[in-house]
Amino acid sequence: MSDATLDPEDNKIIVLARSARARSGAAEGAAVRDETGRTYSSTNVALPSLTLSALQVAVAMAVSSGARSLEAAALVTAGDGPSEADVQAVRDLGGRTLLVADPDGSLRRG
């Protein structure tokens, strides 16, 4: 799937995830879109006492802001992709679309 065929709203969350990752120099960037169209972008957290993936942070941000469901999620990483915990966090809010992209924004085939 190229950017030309990607829904503009889905492309937007990939761009937000890429921007978050680049801005902080983090290993991962993520963004989610809730049922009202609001977006939340984040990076992974790697502290001695707390480790969260970028998707976990983005889902938590959405929930703490009152989101009841997710329309879509995006993960940008040079790593292997989403963990089962990441996938489950998105599914917990009914998310069916989970886009995974490389740091250059290229979508991975799933």
Image: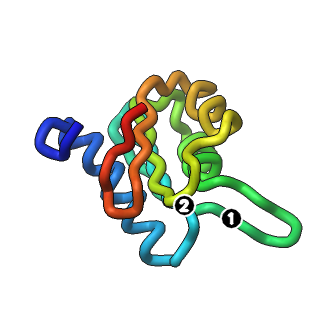
- Alpha-carbon distance for marks 1 and 2? 9 Å
**Residue 83: x, y in percent?**
65, 40
For the C terminus, the image quarter is top left
Residue that extends furthest to the right in the rendered view of this protein: 49
For the residue carrying disc 2, how many other residues have a C-alpha within 10 Å: few (<14), some (14-19), or many (20+)? Answer: many
**Residue 74: x, y in percent?**
43, 45
Q: Going 34% across and 51% down the picture, which residue do you hit?
A: 14
Q: Going 79% across and 71% down the picture, which residue do you hit?
A: 47
Q: Name the residue nearer the viewer: 69 or 12.
A: 12
In front: label 1 or label 2: 2
For the N terminus, the image quarter is top left
Q: Going 65% across and 53% down the picture, which residue do you hit?
A: 53
**Residue type pointed to by label 2:** Glu
**Residue type pointed to by label 1:** Val
Quadrant assignment, res 79: bottom right
User: Which residue is under mark 2?
Assistant: 28
For the residue carrying disc 1, how many other residues have a C-alpha within 10 Å: few (<14), some (14-19), or many (20+)? Answer: some
Above or below residue 97? Residue 55 is: below
**Element assignment for label 1:** strand
Quadrant assignment, res 63: top right
Q: Name the residue nearer the viewer: 99 or 52.
A: 99
Q: Going 64% across and 34% down the picture, which residue do you hit?
A: 89
**Element assignment for label 2:** strand
Q: Is residue 60 left or right of residue 107?
A: right
Above or below residue 71? Residue 22 is: below
Q: Earlier in the sequence, mark 1 or mark 2?
A: 2
**Residue 56: x, y in percent?**
64, 47
Q: Name the residue nearer the viewer: 45 or 83.
A: 83
Residue 45's disc is 1
Quadrant assignment, res 96: top left
Q: Is residue 44 left or right of residue 23?
A: right
